[in-house]
Image: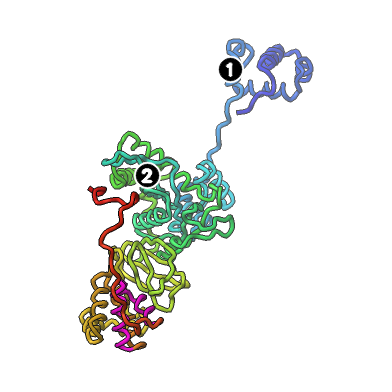
Amino acid sequence: MPTPRVTMSKIRHTLQLLHGGGLSTRQIGAALGISKSTVSEIASYARAANVDWALAQTLSDEELQALLYRPPVPRQSRHLEPDYAYIHRELRRAGVTLQLLWEEYQQQHQGQAYKYSAFCEKYHGWATKLKRSMRQTHVGGDKLFVDYAGQTVPVVDASSGEITQAQIFVAVLGASNYTYACATPTQKAADWVRSIIATLEFISGVPRLLVPDQPRALMARPDRYEPTSHRLLDELCAHYALAVLPARPAKPRDKPKVEVAVQVVERWILARLRHQRFFSLATLNRAITTLVVELNQRPFKKLPGCRASAFAELDRPALRPLPATRMAIANYKRARVNIDYHVELDGHYYSVPHGLVGETVELRVTATTLEVLHGGKRVAAHPLNARRGAHTTTPEHMPASHRAHLQWTPAKLIAWAERIGAATAAVVRWQMEHRAHPEQGYRSCLGLMRLGRQYGGDRLEAACARAQSIRSPHYKSIASILRSGLDQRPLAAPVAVQATLPLHENVRGPGYYH
């Protein structure tokens, strides 16, 4: 609607002077301090609206202005408007461009279609009215954005009453806004990876790119240009053939999809759960799952359909299939190979190739298996064993001499010792009966056999007899006796043991212990 360039009082005065008819437009303009063309314009509007001075005197300023300056009647356009929501949705499909969509629009509305430049200008004008995060064009099956919400949910331990804060993981697909959420106990690397795997199983496929933030749990070295990811995230990418494109630190615009999704989850899911009490993480996750389904079925406000329908149309056909097996979540721990070519984990001992004695290796521990890595290669694998102090040994890991000794049993060892002599047999029996684990007794007996080969059976028998006399039937004691030649000396008479202790004020009597 045109806006008058003069005040309503001057417009009224102009109509009054025009009604008199005695002055020209130039004279009226000079008298009122307006231009000649403005006087002509007011006269023209008055004639078009059939407003004379008599009628103007009966109208208010608003009524007079409405009659004189009516909004122009728009011309009927010969062009048919495109379906901008359809265009916006189709652009998310791989390979679809504005040029292609304009060609289809032109073929459908020949003679009534906009030119390509006007088509693009009108679409971009429509798209700018959407939220900033939605103006980015995302191709179906391309990106999965992941993050943790700032809000947490309290979980009460029913037995102790202790309250812990459950962390809320959120994931969203770029093209369809299809959303997933779940609760985890912490935000450690295992929780991140386990939640991402759950997301992939929720959408039943694998996108091309994973877009996380750069938390310490996932990134060993966060960096704006070349971040270094942790081993567990690398395993996830290798198992699912998934590429990772971390957002730049402190740059939320790199992942606006998940920023909005986190806000939606907080407002639409967590807010609805605020009055409920949860006594386990599983119960909380069941409640979240129910609301996630409802969230994905809510209609869009500015686009047709909902997240679920957009997912079925855009993302699902473009996702790659999941691998045949689910990735096992692993923890890593460094360990040094002991001299007996075993590594220790939670009190149990697992064998590695004997050539790695003294080397530092990496243990990859899953829920059921232990893998030993050296130089990035797997050198041993064992099922987990919870028996503390026990050994899990693979024969191929043993030296050839040790493998030969596997044929020995306690009965054979005692039979060998009895052939040497009674003292040797007594020492071997002691080893079998007093060692915490049979393997330790076997090792000492095999050492005695080596001493017998080195020094002869007679000397070994004499050394065992002397070791018994000093109450030290250990391999080290017997070896020391043989090295020093004490086995060749006669055994001394037993030392007399004093039957009673001398009376002294510092010596407690038997009454002290009653």
Q: Nearer the viewer, mark 1 or mark 2?
A: 2
Vertical comparison of 209 with 249: above or below: below
* Label ID, residue 166: 2
Foreground residue, 152 or 108?
Answer: 152
Foreground residue, 204 or 414?
Answer: 414
- Distance from Cα at disc 1 to Cα at disc 2: 62 Å
Q: Position of residue 239 (x, y in %)?
A: 40, 66
Quadrant assignment for the N terminus: top right
Q: Position of residue 509 (x, y in %)?
A: 27, 51
Vertical comparison of 472 with 41: above or below: below
Q: Determine if residue 439 is in view.
A: no
Q: Is residue 305 left or right of residue 278?
A: right
Vertical comparison of 413 with 64: above or below: below
The amino acid type found where label 2 is placed reads: Ala
Q: What residue is at 53 percent from the left and 44 percent from the top? A: 132
Q: What residue is at 33 percent from the left and 52 percent from the top? A: 504
The part of the chain drawn in magenta is 456-482
Q: Position of residue 151 (x, y in %)?
A: 42, 40
The amino acid type found where label 1 is placed reads: Glu
User: Does 336 appear in magenta?
Assistant: no
The majority secondary structure of the magenta stretch comes to helix
Which residue is tagged 1?
A: 62
Rate crowding at label 1 as few (under 14), some (14 to 19) or many (20 or more) other CA atoms within 10 Å. Answer: few
The quadrant where residue 321 appears = bottom left
Callout 1–callout 2 Cβ contact below 8 Å: no
* Label ID, residue 336: none
Q: Determine if residue 6 is in view.
A: yes
